[in-house]
């Protein structure tokens, strides 16, 4: 595995791979690699000949009161995990070569970015859309794999690829969970063992929604209320939002006409740690 930090070198190499008719698959991460990230690598290996993994803790997607400076950066460990997983190229640039002095161009996908995570984290999806566009230009992938763990981010990326005619196929990968149902996340390290146990309520809420669907409940809003109640009743937990949405537009859906898939979006605090989760629901 070759480690590259210079965007120009990465771009030249990607161009050479393309000229050699290699199919490039990219996985974009902020590092602190875990089983979730490695599942994307596996999927990339099944669909592309060359796998590029990027690690970049992108300052522009963090709000002023978020965890940019304390975000975990175990680079040596990440590099060995990536190598063991069979990554071909690890691209890990410094922030000042990605955002040099006088940088002033951004990418914004307006409507989806103003809802849910976007409403609570102003500027977050502008930061995401900008870095993803830049990394597309630097790594020139035929295929890019993103996790459904960050489902709104995936919807923003699908929209931006369509809107800006970016010639990259986007693949969504299923959420990897711990045995107790907790979705694996780099931020889970902030949870105490008590908070971690309490956080398993998220998966119980998803199971509750599936059970209510099996009972043919059509009123999605009342199921969302039941779920908020389940979270509120869990010691140390507080719901942030619970909503069923249209998978493409992320507009909230109150009742279902039946036999359609929606996304159930969940965000809550366990102690001071904010967690998100989601599930595809046939309702
Ligand atoms: P991050 O490093 O948190 O920005 O995540 C990088 C990529 O890994 C994103 O596409 C995430 O959606 C994906 N990812 C993170 N956690 C998981 C998980 N538990 N299962 C599947 N994909 C994940």
Image: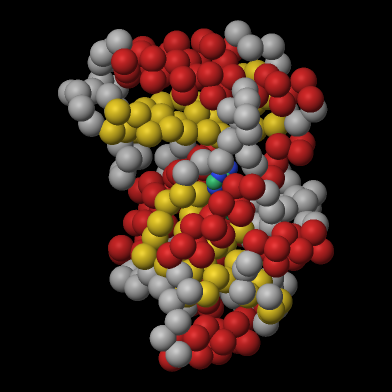
Q: Is residue 136 left or right of residue 39?
A: left
Residue shown at 54% from the left, 30% from the top: 267
Question: From this viewpoint, is residue 153 visible?
Answer: no
Residue 131: image location, x then y, percent: 55, 65
Residue shown at 23% from the left, 23% from the top: 256
Q: Quadrant of residue 165?
A: bottom left
Image colouring: secondary structure
Residue shown at 32% from the left, 40% from the top: 247
Residue shown at 41% from the left, 19% from the top: 209
Quarter of the image with the C terminus in it? top left
Question: From this viewpoint, is residue 160 visible?
Answer: yes
Q: Is residue 108 above or below residue 12?
A: above
Q: Nearer the viewer, residue 179 or 185?
A: 179
Q: Is residue 65 above or below residue 168?
A: above
Q: Which of 115 and 49 is in front in this view?
A: 49
Q: Is residue 200 left or right of residue 67?
A: left
Residue 12: image location, x then y, percent: 55, 89
Quarter of the image with the N terminus in it? bottom right
Looking at the image, the residue that sits furthest to the left is: 257
Q: Is residue 113 left or right of residue 165?
A: right
Residue 193: image location, x then y, percent: 79, 25
Residue 205: image location, x then y, percent: 50, 19
Q: In which quarter of the image is residue 96?
A: bottom right
């Amino acid at each position: 595995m070759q480690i590259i930090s210079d965007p120009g070198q990465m771009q030249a190499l990607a161009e050479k791979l393309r000229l050699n008719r290699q199919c490039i698959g990219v996985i974009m991460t902020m590092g602190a690699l875990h089983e979730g990230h490695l599942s994307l690598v596996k999927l990339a290996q099944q669909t592309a000949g060359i796998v590029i993994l990027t690690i970049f803790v992108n300052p522009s997607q963090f709000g002023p009161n978020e965890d940019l400076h304390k975000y975990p950066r175990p680079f040596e460990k990440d590099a060995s995990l990536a190598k063991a997983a069979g990554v071909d190229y690890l691209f890990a640039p410094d922030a000042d070569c990605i955002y040099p002095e006088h940088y002033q161009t951004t990418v914004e996908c307006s409507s989806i970015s103003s809802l849910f995570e976007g409403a609570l984290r102003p500027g977050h999806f502008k930061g995401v859309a900008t870095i993803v566009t830049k990394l597309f230009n630097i790594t020139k992938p035929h295929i890019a794999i993103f996790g459904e763990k960050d489902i709104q981010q995936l919807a923003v990326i699908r929209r931006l690829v369509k809107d800006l005619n970016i010639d990259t196929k986007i693949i969504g990968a299923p959420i990897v969970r711990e045995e107790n149902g907790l979705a694996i996340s780099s931020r889970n390290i902030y949870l105490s063992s008590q908070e971690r146990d309490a956080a398993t309520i998220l998966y119980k809420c998803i199971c509750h929604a599936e059970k209510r669907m099996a009972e043919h409940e059509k009123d999605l809003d009342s199921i969302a209320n039941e779920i908020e109640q389940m979270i509120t009743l869990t010691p140390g937990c507080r719901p942030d939002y619970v909503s069923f949405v249209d998978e493409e537009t992320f507009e909230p859906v109150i009742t279902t006409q039946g036999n359609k898939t929606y996304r159930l979006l969940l965000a809550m605090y366990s102690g001071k740690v904010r967690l998100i989760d989601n599930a595809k629901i046939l309702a």
